[in-house]
Amino acid sequence: MAIRPERYSSVAIILHWVMAVAFVLMLASGFVMAYGDLSQSLKFRMFQWHKSLGVLLLLAFVLRLGWRLFHRPPAFPASVTGLALAAAKGGHLALYALMILLPLSGWVMVSASVYGLPTIVFGWFEWPHLPGLAGDEGASDGAKTAHLVLALLFAATIAGHVLAVIKHYLFDRENFMARIWWTR
Ligand code: HEM
Ligand code: HEM
């Protein structure tokens, strides 16, 4: 039987926190550039920044999923059972699904856009568009709606994720943060 450590591995900890910060920045930049009162040039630069970090997160996700599939996470404590256990597992699965569906829907949106603007990743290299979609207004509109709905679901799931950590700490005297940091 595989040994189940009490905390996540260092690689999992680094991936969790770097990606957590990056995804929160993606949500914030997405809403600001879509609804903020910005000049045209700032808006353009924000779009490029958002797309750049977004496609890098797609690559980071592949790394994270690969790591997760080959490294078991620490077992949940025996106190987490029934509905709470199902909610924790389902919540983590939903976060993984949203982490991949969000950048994919963004990629479809820009690939199908009638404007055909390229994605230059931090001025460094050009990220290709998905083939066969250029100028497909239906696909672009569908992906845009999906991107917004997924972003709202993502924000709600992250809020639930953080509230669950706080709830366990305050009411169950269980410090889950110690499992995803180098405290033991
Ligand atoms: C910003 C505040 C956040 C806090 C305080 C937080 C806290 C935690 C904690 C304590 C765990 C470990 C749960 C356990 O003991 O098993 C965890 C796991 C996890 N977190 Fe977060 N997290 C945050 C943000 C995020 C964000 C933004 C995402 C998504 C991008 C995310 C995705 C995940 C996933 C998928 C796991 C499960 C890892 C696995 O078992 O493979 N977290 N988080
Ligand atoms: C990685 C996770 C991502 C998150 C969390 C995210 C989040 C968001 C949010 C919250 C919005 C505002 C939604 C609206 O009100 O319509 C948005 C808009 C947008 N996102 Fe993302 N995004 C991500 C990845 C991407 C990627 C990879 C691309 C393209 C390569 C992209 C392209 C866009 C574009 C073009 C818009 C503007 C849509 C419009 O109003 O015209 N996003 N994003």
Image (cartoon, rainbow, N blue to C red):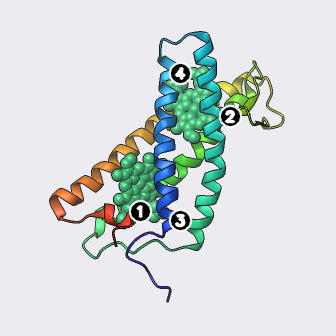
Q: Distance between the residues labelled 1 and 2?
A: 35 Å
Instruction: Note whether ligand 2 is within 8 Å of mark 2.
Output: no
Q: Do the residues labelled 2 and 3 touch (CB within 8 Å)?
A: no
Question: What number is the disc on residue 33?
Answer: 4
Q: Is mark 4 on a helix, strand or loop?
A: helix
- Furthest toward the left, the residue is 171
Instruction: Note whether ligand 1 is within 8 Å of mark 1.
Output: no
User: How far from the left and from the top, in percent, is residue 6?
Assistant: 37, 76
Which of marks 3 and 2 precedes in the sequence?
3
Instruction: List the residue tagged with mark 3.
Output: 11
Which of marks 2 and 1 precedes in the sequence?
1
- Furthest toward the right, the residue is 132
Which image quadrant for residue 184? bottom left
Q: Residues within 10 Å of mark 4 (few under 14, many from 20)?
A: some
Amino acid type of the residue that numbered disc 1 sits on in the rendered structure? Lys
User: How far from the left and from the top, in percent, is residue 22?
Assistant: 51, 43
Which of marks 3 and 4 precedes in the sequence?
3
Instruction: Note whether ligand 2 is within 8 Å of mark 4.
Output: yes
Q: How far apart are marks 4 and 3 (CA)?
A: 32 Å
Which of marks 1 and 4 precedes in the sequence?
4
Tell me, yes or no, if residue 113 can be seen here.
yes
Question: What number is the disc on residue 89?
Answer: 1
Which of marks 1 and 3 precedes in the sequence?
3
Q: Residue at x 28, y 76 (%)?
A: 78
Q: How far apart are marks 4 and 2 (CA)?
A: 17 Å
Left of 170 or right of it: where is 111?
right
- Which image quadrant shows ligand 1? bottom left
Q: Distance between the residues labelled 4 and 1?
A: 33 Å
Instruction: List the residue tagged with mark 2.
Output: 122
In front here: 31 or 53? Answer: 53
Which of marks 2 and 4 precedes in the sequence?
4
Amino acid type of the residue that numbered disc 4 sits on in the rendered structure? Met
